[in-house]
Image (cartoon, rainbow, N blue to C red):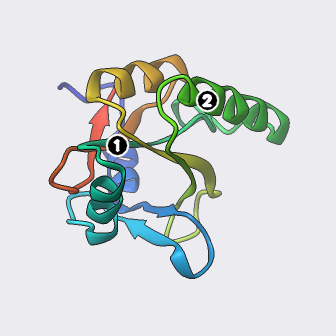
Amino acid sequence: MDHTKISIEKISAYEATHYAVGSGPDAFILRIGEFSPRLKDLFNVNKVSCGVFITAFNPFGSVQSGDANETAHLKLRADLKKITSVILDGTGADPMGDWPPEASYLALGVDQETAEQLGRRFHQDAIVWSRSDAVPSLLFLR
């Protein structure tokens, strides 16, 4: 896909982001292009072959108010509940701390087409999606 609407700097930031799933001692980090044994375990336990890590915060990378982000986040969760029963809380975090963390979800069993539709509905530049190999990749949406 042609990434002309997304700057190289943004793409680099998305690639470097730590996509944290869960909290406490069970939390783990998804990294773009890196196999995740924890994600693979989740796929196996839940008998699914794919999943999406997605946020509704800050559409197209434009900082929104806390209220606007929270409203969108709750709408995203409601939409995900119509698709899957396995939704884990997450956070997308810039390891350098230059961008505020974004509340997110890891939703299991969401196919690529549905994941892309959700990302577009919530005006995201990209989503993180993984097939059964448990290697997360960025899917650019514009």
Quarter placement of the N terminus: top left
Asked if the residue at tag 2 contacts the one at tag 1, i.e. Cβ–Cβ closer than 8 Å, the answer is no
- Residue 42's label in the rendered image is none
- Point out residue 19 in the picture as x, y percentages from the top left corner: 45, 59
Numbered disc 2: secondary structure: helix
Residue of label 2: 76
User: Spatial distance from mark 1 to mark 2, Cα to Cα?
Assistant: 15 Å
At x 51% / y 17%, what residue is drawn?
Answer: 121
Badge 2 amino acid: Leu
Out of 3 and 68, give the one closest to the viewer: 68
- Point out residue 112 in the picture as x, y percentages from the top left corner: 27, 29
- Residue 51's label in the rendered image is 1
Numbered disc 1: secondary structure: strand
Q: Check disc 2: other Cα within 10 Å, few if <14, some if 14-19, many if 20+.
A: many
At x 61% / y 70%, what residue is drawn?
Answer: 23
At x 57% / y 57%, what residue is drawn?
Answer: 91
Badge 1 amino acid: Gly
At x 36% / y 22%, what residue is drawn?
Answer: 114
Vertically, is 138 above or below 30? above
Vertically, is 34 above or below 142? below
Out of 130 and 85, give the one closest to the viewer: 85
Vertically, is 91 above or below 54? below
Vertically, is 134 above or below 81? below
Taking 122 as reference, is 4 left or right?
left
Q: Quadrant of residue 72?
A: top right
Q: Check disc 1: other Cα within 10 Å, few if <14, some if 14-19, many if 20+.
A: many
Mark earlier in primary sequence (1, 2): 1
Out of 4 and 18, give the one closest to the viewer: 18
Residue found at the very far right of the displayed protein: 67
Q: Quadrant of residue 97?
A: bottom right
Quarter placement of the C terminus: top left
